[in-house]
Image: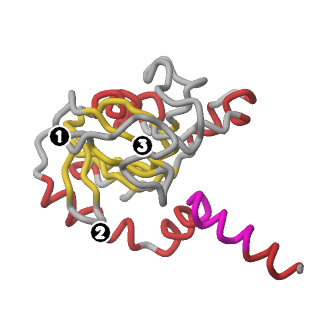
């Protein structure tokens, strides 16, 4: 029997964290192929929130926040609601949109607001090409230890293509919400 879980880590956040505008969220698909279970979680990188991330390197929601791949991996156990998925060992992440892998735990990752560029002209910070470029609202697939990324790609495709999953991702996509608000304002004029 197949078990499906969709979790939203925002249920665990405090009122203050919900108000924080510097929070950047990523979606993460967790899978345990041997047990045929998966869970979609949200990882928040709010500077106010996490003992895992420590203080954020940015104070503005438009500025990128910089962490490491390991801090994202560590946040899985904090956000997973299915114990088997939370306790599983992960070696990195896989980006299904371009099949890029992030398996160097010490690699820095920069989480941008979607639509921004690698060089933020409002700060003096230039994001190095060796830094993993991640985007707010993006979906990453956690790679469990012992599974090659091609297998994770093959297993994640039908899950991410599922209509219900797509709808949930679209609802929580910050760019989709901004476009909807803008469209609604334009219609009211």
Q: Are marks 3 and 2 in contact (CB under 8 Å)?
A: no
| Residue at point 69%, 71% (across, down) | 180
Instruction: Name the residue tied to disc 3.
Output: 111
Magenta-highlighted residues: 171-182
Q: Which mark is residue 157?
A: 2
> How much space separates mark 2 and mark 1, taking CA atoms?
20 Å
Eye-nearest disc, 2 or 1:
1
Q: Residues within 10 Å of mark 1 (few under 14, many from 20)?
A: some
Question: Which quadrant is the C terminus positioned in?
Answer: bottom right
Overall secondary structure of the magenta section: helix
Q: Secondary structure at mark 3?
A: strand
Mark 3 and mark 2 lie on one chain; the one further toward the N terminus is: 3
Eye-nearest disc, 3 or 1:
3
- Examine the image and state in which quarter residue 162 appears: bottom left
Q: Which mark is residue 103?
A: 1
Q: Residues within 10 Å of mark 2 (few under 14, many from 20)?
A: few
Q: Is residue 185 above or below residue 89?
A: below
Residue 174: x and y in percent read 59, 57
Q: Is residue 57 magenta?
A: no
Residue 106: x and y in percent read 21, 27
Residue nearest the viewer, comparing 130 with 120: 120
């Amino acid at each position: 029997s197949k078990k499906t879980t969709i979790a939203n880590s925002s249920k665990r956040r405090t009122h203050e964290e919900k108000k924080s505008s510097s929070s950047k969220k990523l979606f993460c698909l967790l899978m345990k192929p041997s047990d045929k279970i998966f869970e979609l979680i949200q990882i928040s990188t709010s500077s106010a929130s996490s003992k895992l991330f420590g203080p954020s390197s940015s104070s503005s929601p438009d500025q990128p926040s910089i962490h490491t791949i390991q801090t994202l991996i560590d946040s899985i156990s904090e956000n997973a609601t299915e114990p088997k998925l939370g306790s599983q060992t992960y070696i990195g992440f896989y980006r299904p949109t371009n099949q890029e892998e992030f398996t160097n735990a010490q690699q820095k990752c920069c989480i941008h607001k979607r639509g921004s560029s690698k060089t933020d002209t409002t700060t003096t910070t230039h994001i190095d090409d060796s830094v993993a470029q991640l985007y707010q609202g993006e979906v990453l697939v956690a790679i469990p230890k012992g599974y090659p990324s091609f297998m994770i790609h093959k297993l994640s495709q039908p899950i991410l293509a599922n209509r219900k999953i797509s709808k949930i991702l679209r609802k929580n996509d910050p760019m989709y919400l901004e476009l909807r608000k803008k469209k609604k304002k334009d219609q009211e004029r």
